[in-house]
Amino acid sequence: MPRVFVARQIPDAGLKLLYDAFGRDSIVVFPEDRIISRAELIAGVKGVDAVLPILTDKIDGEVLDAAGSQLRIVANFAVGYNNIDVPAATARKVPITNTPGVLTDTTADLTFALILSVARRMGEGERMVRARQWPGWGPMQLMGSDVFGKTLGIFGMGRIGQAVAKRATGFDMKVLYTNRKPLDTALEKQLNARYVDKATLLAESDYLSIHCPLMPETTHAFGAPEFSTMKKSSYLINTSRGPVVDESALVKALKHGDIAGAGLDVYEHEPTLHEGLYDCENAVIAPHLGSATLETRGKMASIAATNIIARLRGERPPNCVNPEVLD
Ligand code: DGY
């Protein structure tokens, strides 16, 4: 029987598929519900046929070599796979898979939760009430910004960006987007979205929401030069990957009032945030909850398991990001 190493406790739906396919003795799940250390990861992958890591586990050449040449697949428990050195895996003929599709709407919902929370100062209000400091209703109290009718800028119009655009129509928002290439006209029309360059997106958005993958070209795509051209009344929302935003420049922009606020789910050095962010009342800071619903995490677990089962049975794993290794 093949051996599978699961680097973190995942929902039962995925484990059940693996147990049914290969038997319980073939599957080793890292026993503690915490981020695995590098040494534990390297020890855990030794001699296995499949690894199921989560997005905080760095899978590079060293880890792949520690696993050994019998390794047949790394099935990431995430749609983003910037934690994996894909060229290193490709060089070793190891397919990498992800979990696309199932978390699109869940992440789009969270994006809107952040837009609404930061615009309507929900965090500040909640903190005031919980601290028993609410003096009662006041005409000037915690005035925020409307969301309906405003301009939403979407940076990265893939599946999640499009799902966010779809939600924006319910808020009568004007939708602009920047993408590697424009969507086809029919889809643009359906989403009521207009393709613009990045400079226009920065200048015109009231809410600018990031939905691009993390790549060398998108690292620090939002920093001091970008914040200086955004409206002072605008909000930055990030549910993609932390390093797309220069967090230290963001803190400065939030503190100097270059932008009105930020709704963040992801950070440059998770789980540590730039120290200044903790004091920014105009930032809503969520703990990477994008896909965190019972339904979606269950589906992500099942997809990761399905990729492993397919590969170890000699079939094509459905969500391979480096399919050239399968040819
Ligand atoms: C992903 O799958 O990339 C998400 O960030 C997980 O929440």
Image (cartoon, rainbow, N blue to C red):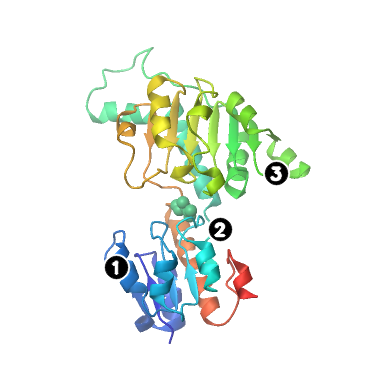
Task: Identify which residue is drawn at 55% across, 74% down.
Answer: 93
Mark 1, ligand 1, within 8 Å: the answer is no
Q: CA distance from mark 2 to mark 3?
A: 20 Å
Earlier-in-chain disc, 1 versus 2: 1
Q: CA distance from mark 3 to mark 1?
A: 42 Å
Which quadrant of the figure has residue 155? top right
Query: Residue 181's mark?
Result: 3
Q: Nearer the viewer, residue 111 or 228?
A: 228
| Foreground label between 2 and 3 | 3
Earlier-in-chain disc, 2 versus 3: 2
Q: Nearer the viewer, residue 300 or 277?
A: 277
Earlier-in-chain disc, 3 versus 1: 1
Residue 211 lies, in percent from the top left, at: 55, 43
Q: Is residue 164 visible?
A: yes
For the residue carrying disc 1, how many other residues have a C-alpha within 10 Å: few (<14), some (14-19), or many (20+)?
A: few
Residue marked by disc 2: 100
Q: Amino acid at mark 1?
A: Glu
Task: Identify which residue is drawn at 50% across, 73% down.
Answer: 73
Residue 260 lies, in percent from the top left, at: 45, 23
Which quadrant of the figure has residue 7? bottom left
As drawn, the residue found furthest toward the top would be 139
Q: Amino acid at mark 3?
A: Lys
Which quadrant of the figure has residue 316? bottom right
Q: CA distance from mark 1 to mark 2?
A: 28 Å
Q: Nearer the viewer, residue 218 or 302?
A: 218
Q: Amino acid at mark 2?
A: Pro
Task: Identify which residue is drawn at 61% across, 49% down.
Answer: 159
As drawn, the residue found furthest toward the bottom would be 1
Residue 228 lies, in percent from the top left, at: 51, 23
Residue marked by disc 1: 40
For the residue carrying disc 3, how many other residues have a C-alpha within 10 Å: few (<14), some (14-19), or many (20+)?
A: few
